[in-house]
Image: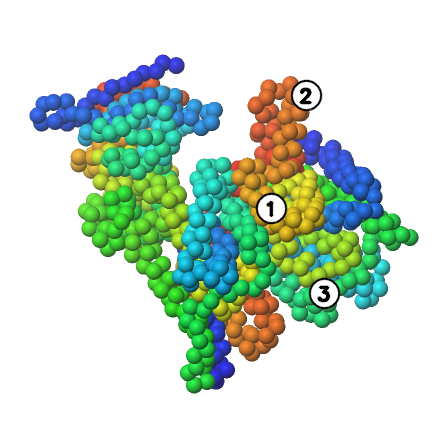
Amino acid sequence: MSNFGNLLLAGITSGAIYAVFAACLSIWFRVANVLNLAIGDFAMIGAIGTAELAQDAHMPLWLAILIPLVASGLIAWAFDWVVLHPALDGGRGHSGIVSVFFYTFALSFILEGAARIVFGTDVHAAPALWSGNALSFGSLHIERAGILVLGLAIVIGGLAAGYLYYTMSGKAATASGESVIGSRVVGINTHKLRRQIFVTTAVIAALFGVVESPLTGFTFSSGPTISLIGVVAAGFAGFRRPGRAVVAGLLIGLAESFLGGYLSTSYNEILLYALLAVVIMIRPGVLGIATAH
Amino acid sequence: MQPRTDWLSNRSGVIPLGYGVAVAGVAIIVLLGLGGSYNANVFTVALGYAIVTIGMSIQLGYSHQLAFSQSAFMGFGAYAVAILEVKYQVPTALAFLAAIVGAALVSLLMSSVLTRIAGLALALVTLLIPQIVSQLATFSHYLGSFAGISGVQPLYNGETFQQSLLGTGIVAALILGLVAFIAVRILRSGVGLQLSAVAANEGMAEGMGVSLGQRKIEVFVLGSVLAALGGAVVASAQNIVTPDLAGESSQLTLLVMLFVGGRRSVWGAIVGAVAIEYLSNLSGTITTNLSIIEGVLLLLVLLFEPDGLGGIVQRGWRALRNARHRTPAGEPDATQQFAPVPLRPDAVAPVGGGDTGE
Amino acid sequence: MARLTVQGRTAKGNSGTDGTPEQPVLVAADVAVSYGKHQAVESASFSVRPGEFVSLVGPNGHGKSSLVGALAGVVARKGQVHVNGSRLPSGNPIAAIRAGLVLVPERRHLYPGMTVRDNILLGRYSKTRKRLVRNAWDEVAEVVALFPEVGRRLNQRAGTLSGGEQQMVALARGLAAGPELLVLDEPCLGLSESVTARVYEALVRLSATSVSILLVEENPVRALQVSSRILSVHQGTITGEDRAGSAREALR
């Protein structure tokens, strides 16, 4: 029973991590019809940046967190300015499969390469924001960082839902993804909204990297795996449903935890990926999408 | 503006053959120029990758089939050949044949399910497959765990090391030539036209009488078999196969090769593979910073030259030909402009500029 | 080709009560649109007076949609456009909406996955963009009252409506912005005769209010039935103008 309980807690914690990345991905996809495959790399920048600044440069923790967050935002802003704006708004680039995947895919490459040069290849973890041993409730144990992850996930999820469903700006963001021309004729600046949300989700991902890195640790190449699980979780929610993406993320976390706990610790990732692949193949309808928009 | 039907009928066998011979010929000349050096080995590995990217250009470039499982099939081909040769002492040719047949069967089985799901869903599933295969290889003792399987036989056993190296390269070049021939032959045929139609608009293509399901399965199997063949060549050139070959990062490298070379051109697919593989072995600094270079290259191609290196050369070639035909510059000749689908595989975008957007 | 510059004339006799000539709601001078080397609109000059119902007629592909797109700022242009006396910059739809010119685009371009309510709410986005959703509804509620068939389907997704109903939503969305000049681009494209009649009925109801209307219509007979003035567009130029009355006579 306690084994089950602990697996459940661990599953919810890692599920919350997937959920936040999936939510960030799907919010931006909702606006831009582009998948942010670099979302994991922004988390990596947050985590490793904070670790280096706090531990090697001995900066105060708040500053060590702030600088990578600002850097992530600036990188996202610059990428939008230099690449996404001319590519998606200028009619120069492509729509369809190329824009859905490959611009942010290139960004992921660049961030990964830059991180390797700047940070090296070691495993880093930002200092714990709430240090101490794991909390125990009877036979149940949960890491303090896990509680922070859960709390932050709930706050971010709530804010995102509030923005999308209760503000006109959130409605406009959704409309931008539904019809660009339809949005422009009512005075929605689709480019500005897309950029704002891209920058915001990049900063959120970086912040989340800082909070969760004590649990998982980060290397320069941690990004793509996080992005992949995020994309899959977002995909289960039809890509443009952040609320359902959160649920999908949690379920994936739970599945991973139980597969690892009850079946095989070394094969749990394979089993997880295989399970996801099979679910998509059997029930492509769960994705709620037929083709790229 | 009479459509050039001659491309489809009487000359349809000759041009692809010329293409294949030219590819093999140029590759062999380069190999002989490099001699038995380390670079010859790098070039041979690149030829293996080129076999894979040719398949990808048919899958992704022409047919818009969003499948990202090529590295998994590269791993499949490489491991199949490695196991058969190292553990069971099967002759190389037979091992290759088995790898190809195996890949065909596996991909046929997969495609019967996979090709029914569309667009992004297919992309998602196939993104997961390289992860599964590489992890499986990493954890399986039978497949040699992290270290992989070493001792894969070269494609040609010469008396000296240099002879084997060069011989392997020449055999790889011949295989690549054959693959290029087959690819161009397919793209120039009626099937090629149908694929372009499917890429432009699936529903409309089906309405025009294209058997959609069958074409999708064929494309998936072809791409997977070529990936397995390429993987087997790479393993033979490197004499070793490791789980990395099947994994995600290998898949990413393949995509960069395809896009930098030009995703709608057989020629471009080859050049992209050779260029990226050459870059990654050029010097220590470049190898360390490879992902930045690849990322920037990819962005430059996407923003400025959607058809990659192949597109640049194509435009130069067209300008040259126009000058020869004394067509005024800037005015594309009518056959080019109105050709409904690319009659020459490396020439024009599919109907509607390729990607169908809003 | 002759370039005919047409001055606006008041057709409805809707001039100001104080007797001074009213300022036109729209003045377009030498508007030109080109896509690369292709000149879609050569040089169009015309004006629309308050309360007028003006139709732009002409065959497909002769630049009507490009012209109104240029007026609304969704297509880049050359030449001057003034709405209610203020000059509109090129390629800026927000400025056009603020000045009072609202476009209902060809093929509607609704947000198919969103509810009818959200579609109409977003019509007023230019004035409510900093608000919460629940504080934004009151101002568009009266627009919905004009379209009873839309009002019954507020919680349905726009993409699930029939073509005619979607066109009504598009009209409501356009009106929600509170326009002085509503520009409609081919509102009846692809609609059946009976649905077209309903859409036109709604337009006639609208023209009775203070809103001026600029309608792009391929079918001149339909346009004649409702508008006060017709401008014909041919090969990117405005080639003629007619008071609807005399044209109606000629048609008989």
Which amino acid, by three-letter code, is at mark 3? Ala
Secondary element type, mark 3: helix
Q: Position of residue C118 (x, y in %)?
A: 30, 51
Q: Residue at x 43, y 73 (%)?
A: A131
Quadrant housing residue B266: top right
The chain holding disc 3 is B
* Distance of label 3 from label 1 (alpha carbons): 28 Å
Q: Residues within 10 Å of mark 3 (few under 14, many from 20)?
A: some
Query: Which numbered mark, 3 or 2, is in the foreground of this view?
Result: 3
Residue assigned mark 1:
B293
- Left or right of residue B135, residue B148 in this image: right
Q: Earlier in the sequence, mark 3 or mark 1?
A: 3
Residue assigned mark 3:
B147
Q: Earlier in the sequence, mark 3 or mark 2?
A: 3
Query: Which numbered mark, 1 or 2, is in the foreground of this view?
Result: 1
Q: Residue at x 60, y 31 (%)?
A: B339
Q: Residues within 10 Å of mark 1 (few under 14, many from 20)?
A: many
Q: Position of residue B148 (x, y in %)?
A: 72, 64
Which amino acid, by three-letter code, is at mark 1? Ile
Residue assigned mark 2:
B324
Q: Residues within 10 Å of mark 2 (few under 14, many from 20)?
A: few
Using the rendered image of the protein, determine whether residue A239 is visible from the camera's viewpoint. no
The chain holding disc 2 is B
